[in-house]
Amino acid sequence: MHERVLRVSEALRELGSEAEVVELPDPAPTAATAAAQVGCPVGAIANSLVFSVDGAPLLVLTSGAHRVDTRRLADLLCVARKRVRRADPAFVLTATGQEVGGVAPVGHPQPVRTLIDATLAGYEHLWAGAGMPHTVFRTTYPELVRITGGEPAEVAQEPA
């Protein structure tokens, strides 16, 4: 097991989760490819997106069927929209210890402020990244809020 996946698995245990990391047959670079491999709706994939807000990391978990509305995000954070930027891969790796495409909601070197989009609450089960592009774990919205210490928020824009 890769060290990043091991860190996520250990973090899940430490946080009292019984979720098991699942290795997918193929990498899942998009929510659609992940959903196809685990057999769930695209919306039940909890995308982990990292933003830089004035240089501080912010993890936003949103449904794979939605995009983050950065205007709404900036309003929630009480900052100008230009201060909220999608993080580059180096920033993501530094903040989470994981690479873009495999960012998990837990297992980071330091706590990362986390917002969890309310659209995810509409699914009985969710699938989240587990440290590598081909690993995921199954969870629920309440558990995701609990294990991340995340703040439920309305940050999604409607799909096109």
Image (cartoon, helix red, strand yellow):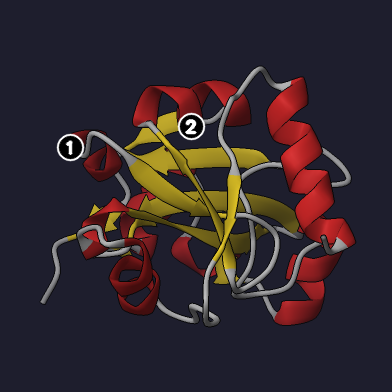
Measured as percent of width and height from the top left, residue 46 is found at 41, 53
| Figure check: 93 above or below 139 | below
* Residue bearing mark 1: 122
Quick check: 128 left or right of 23? left
| Figure check: 5 above or below 2 | above
Q: Quadrant of residue 31?
A: bottom left
* Residue bearing mark 2: 144
Q: Quadrant of residue 119?
A: top left
| Figure check: 49 above or below 34 | above
Residue 160 versus residue 106: which sits nearer the camera? 106
Measured as percent of width and height from the top left, residue 131 is found at 70, 60
Q: Secondary structure at mark 2?
A: helix
Can I make out residue 87 in this image? yes
Q: Amino acid at mark 2?
A: Leu
Can I make out residue 107 in this image? no
* Residue at horizontal 63 percent and vertical 55 percent from the top: 130
* Residue at horizontal 24 percent and vertical 58 percent from the top: 40
